[in-house]
Image (spheres, rainbow, N blue to C red):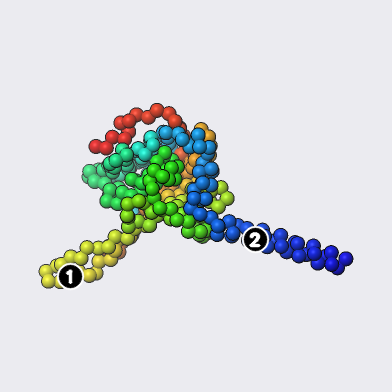
């Protein structure tokens, strides 16, 4: 009897240890290719993922959280066909009209959005550092340009970084390095249960240019630091594809002067259409 109880206890202990260690082993054994394959399976079948066009519409709220204050509403329209896309965010504000970013497959465009015929701070940043736009990363799966739909098209280097704690939750971390060199550090994060893409974080530090004032070298300037976050949530089915319906874009800028600004665009997607015809004029770069 005692021997039987001992065997049962050993088996129970072994089962508990297996349950505790299995997720860790899975994470440890994960490769970038495994993660991308699971992510694609979470999106939909190969036939559904092959949709050539996508139109995303929704309501948007724009907020200035640091470096000012204010809030305004508007509408968003994302139109994409393969690698081509237009991301339009129209804001109902007297001074700030929103953003319009276009990529025609070769060239990109960042429109003026302020009443003074200037780009916004984020628009100017994207204009000078266009990697998120050119790589098809911006907007995630809300456009057909999402590079993980066909990693061979971008030939980016993908490196699995393990499970990382982000805002209190464990997420799979995939480091994304474009084929062409960049000063950006780009991390794509995935839910460990669903493998949905839930977050992209871009960071870049721009060193100041040394300037001479008379005979004196100005060494007081500090680097500019930029951080862009894209949060995706509330996934739903559209034409056989599981896509996010909540999209939050955050842009933090730490200036050389020591000031900091934080802007947020929060989009509640109301409609997504896949595979329908789109007007090619959407992708005209002027």
* Nearer to me, 286 or 104: 104
Q: In the visual, does 71 lie left or right of 19? A: left
What residue is at 79 percent from the left and 62 percent from the top? 8
> How far across and how far down the image is residue 33, in percent?
49, 50
From the viewer's perspective, is 39 left or right of 279?
right
Q: Residue furthest right?
A: 1
In the rendered view, would you say 220 is above or below 74?
Answer: below
Gap between marks 2 and 1, in whole Å?
Answer: 59 Å
Residue that appears at 32% across and 52% down: 180
Marks 2 and 1, the one that precedes in the sequence? 2
Q: Which residue is mark 1?
A: 217
- Residue 209 in percent (x, y) is at 22, 63
Where disc 2 sits, the SS reads helix
Residue 155 seen from this side: yes
Question: Which callout, 2 or 1, points to the residue nearer the camera?
Answer: 2
In front of the other: 246 or 194? 194
Image height of 142 relative to 231, above or below: above
Vertical placement of residue 113 versus 16, above or below = above
Local crowd size for mark 2, using a 10 Å CA cut-off: few (<14), some (14–19), many (≥20): few
Q: Residues within 10 Å of mark 1 (few under 14, many from 20)?
A: few
The quadrant the C terminus occupies is top left
Give the secondary structure at mark 1. Answer: strand
Question: Which dot marks residue 144?
Answer: none
Specify whether residue 74 is in view: no
Rendered location of residue 247, percent (x, y): 45, 45
Q: Which residue is mark 2?
A: 20
* Of the pair 164 and 249, the residue shown nearer to us: 164
- Write the residue at 54% across / 43% down: 42
């Amino acid at each position: 009897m005692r021997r039987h109880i001992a065997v049962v206890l050993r088996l129970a202990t072994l089962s508990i240890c297996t349950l505790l260690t299995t997720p860790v082993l899975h994470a440890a054994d994960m490769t970038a290719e495994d993660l991308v394959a699971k992510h694609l399976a979470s999106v939909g079948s190969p036939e559904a993922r092959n949709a050539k066009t996508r139109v995303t519409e929704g309501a948007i709220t724009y907020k200035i959280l640091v470096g000012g204050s204010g809030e305004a509403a508007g509408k968003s329209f994302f139109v994409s066909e393969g690698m081509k896309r237009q991301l339009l965010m129209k804001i109902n504000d007297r001074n700030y009209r929103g953003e319009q970013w276009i990529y025609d497959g070769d060239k990109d465009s960042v429109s003026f959005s302020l009443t003074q015929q200037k780009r916004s701070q984020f628009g100017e940043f994207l204009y000078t550092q266009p990697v998120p736009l050119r790589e098809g990363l911006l907007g995630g799966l809300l456009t057909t340009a999402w590079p993980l739909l066909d990693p061979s098209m971008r030939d980016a280097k993908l490196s699995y970084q393990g499970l990382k704690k982000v805002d209190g939750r464990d997420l799979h971390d995939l480091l994304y390095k474009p084929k062409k060199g960049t000063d950006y550090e780009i991390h794509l994060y995935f839910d460990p249960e669903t493998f949905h893409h839930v977050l992209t974080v871009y960071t870049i530090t721009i060193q100041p240019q040394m300037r001479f004032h008379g005979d004196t070298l100005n060494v007081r300037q500090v680097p500019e630091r930029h951080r862009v976050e894209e949060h995706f949530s509330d996934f739903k089915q559209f034409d056989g594809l599981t896509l996010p319906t909540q999209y939050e874009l955050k842009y933090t800028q730490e200036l050389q002067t020591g000031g900091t600004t934080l802007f947020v665009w929060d989009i509640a997607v109301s409609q997504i259409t896949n595979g329908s015809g789109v007007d090619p004029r959407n992708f005209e770069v002027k």
